[in-house]
Image: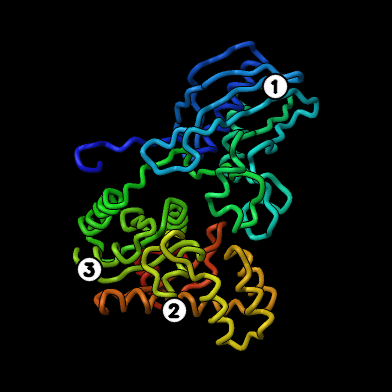
């Protein structure tokens, strides 16, 4: 809610692409043209998606979904997400990007260099949606296009990340949740209240759902895991106000390394010192100017960690974890004991300081 208005959720570009692909396949294989169908996200949730229109292609069938960002300030809102589906004889589902979908040109992202910027969860959703409707032992090629995507992408981080020629097809849940900041921040507070109500004076603060899932998979209690989004400082202060004594900062190093630089609102539009932080810490361990320069020009933290691994400087991540904990504790004037665990995109812990290990063990972390 914001004021007296209930904010409207939207659908991700990944959900749009999956629904368009499913609709095009139904038209191609069964001559059916639904105006509304559902796609499934990795949590098993069914997401209804309206189909805008269909197109006949020389070698297949196309379907169009108009991106609806809901009440989120989404630059892709209103774009047409088009899927073109054609038969193949190899029995597999192949997914590629067309007009307006970017191509990855630099290492460090979830997609390999040279591939279309269609992220893993959207690829899974597209494949799952198609598998529900294509005949057995039949294959297909699906091409996802976004007219106008290249122009819109210039207003995103894609050029900086090395994704060129269009937008990325994104989404980890398939649903876009409104980002009215004050309302969003306040909506997170009950998670701390719930942890306290269940007797926890320690909580795990994590940026989002992926971190929350990784936490419970490692044995940390679900009721003690609190999503904080980008609002690190706000949530640390809220923990103090609610009597929490210890906090484990837990999540992808791309977010939490910012805390090591004293950044407590981690949205990229607010501040970003990842390169500078890791470069400075590497220099403190004796890294030469060539390594420092390589870190400073890297576009993703994944690429930076690759450099650190190659140069046998992964101790930098240990320093980053310790520094993030120290900066977080100082932010709340020492009223919290803070530990930090830095994870990669597979949920593997790459660094954890001693307070993180202590708090984690007390909460049941299977270290």
Q: What element carries label 3?
A: helix
Residue 126, position as x, y percentages in the image: 60, 33
Q: Identify the residue at horizontal 51%, vertical 76% (top origin).
A: 277
Contact check, label 2 and label 1, Cβ < 8 Å: no
1 or 3: tag closer to the N-terminus: 1
Camera-near label (1 vs 3) is: 3
**Vertical relation: 110 (above or below) 236:** above
Q: Depth check: 64 or 128 in front? A: 64
**Residue where numbered disc 2 is placed:** 322
Task: Give the label on residue 240, or none.
Answer: 3
- Relative side of 229 to 316, left or right: left
106 up-or-down from 78: above or below: below
Task: Say few, some or many: other residues with alpha carbon within 10 Å of mark 3 (under 14 / 14 to 19 / 20 or more).
Answer: some
Question: Which residue is labeled 1 in the image?
Answer: 136
Note whether 242 is above or below 46 in the view shown: below
Q: Looking at the picture, tell me which residue is in the foreground, 69 or 24.
A: 69
Q: Compared to 195, does 295 lie above or below?
A: below
Between marks 1 and 3, how big is the CA–CA gap? 57 Å
Q: In which quarter of the image is residue 2?
A: top left
In what element is the residue under mark 2?
helix
Residue 360 position, x and y percent, is 39, 68
């Amino acid at each position: 809610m914001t004021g007296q208005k209930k904010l409207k959720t939207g659908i991700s570009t990944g959900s749009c692409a999956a629904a368009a692909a499913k609709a095009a396949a139904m038209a191609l294989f069964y001559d059916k043209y639904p105006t509304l169908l559902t796609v499934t996200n990795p949590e098993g949730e069914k997401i209804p998606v309206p189909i805008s229109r269909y197109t006949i292609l020389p070698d297949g069938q196309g379907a169009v979904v108009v991106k609806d960002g809901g009440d989120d300030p989404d630059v892709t809102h209103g774009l047409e997400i088009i899927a073109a589906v054609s038969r193949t004889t190899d029995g597999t589902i192949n997914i590629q990007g067309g007009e307006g979908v970017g191509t990855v040109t630099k290492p460090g992202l979830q997609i390999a260099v040279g591939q279309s910027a269609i992220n893993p969860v959207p690829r899974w959703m597209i494949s799952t949606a198609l598998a529900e409707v294509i005949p057995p032992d039949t294959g297909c090629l699906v091409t996802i296009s976004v007219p106008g995507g290249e122009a819109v992408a210039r207003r995103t981080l894609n050029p900086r990340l090395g994704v060129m020629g269009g937008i990325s097809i994104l989404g980890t849940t398939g649903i876009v949740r409104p980002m009215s900041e004050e309302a969003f921040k306040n909506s997170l507070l009950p998670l701390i209240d719930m942890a306290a109500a269940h007797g926890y004076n320690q909580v795990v603060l994590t940026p989002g759902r992926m971190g929350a899932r990784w936490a419970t998979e490692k044995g940390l209690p679900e009721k003690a895991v609190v999503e904080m989004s980008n609002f690190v400082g706000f949530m640390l202060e809220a923990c103090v106000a609610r009597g929490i004594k210890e906090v484990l900062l837990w999540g992808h190093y791309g977010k939490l390394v910012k805390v090591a630089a004293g950044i407590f609102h981690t949205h990229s539009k607010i501040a970003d010192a990842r390169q500078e932080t890791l470069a400075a810490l590497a220099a403190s361990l004796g890294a030469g100017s060539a390594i420092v320069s390589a870190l400073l020009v890297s576009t993703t933290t994944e690429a930076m960690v690759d450099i650190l691994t190659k140069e046998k400087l992964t101790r930098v991540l240990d320093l980053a974890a310790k520094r993030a904990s120290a900066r977080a504790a100082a932010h709340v004037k020492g009223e919290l004991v803070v530990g930090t665990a830095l994870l990669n995109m597979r949920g593997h812990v790459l660094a954890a300081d001693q307070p993180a290990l202590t708090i984690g063990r007390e909460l049941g972390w299977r270290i």
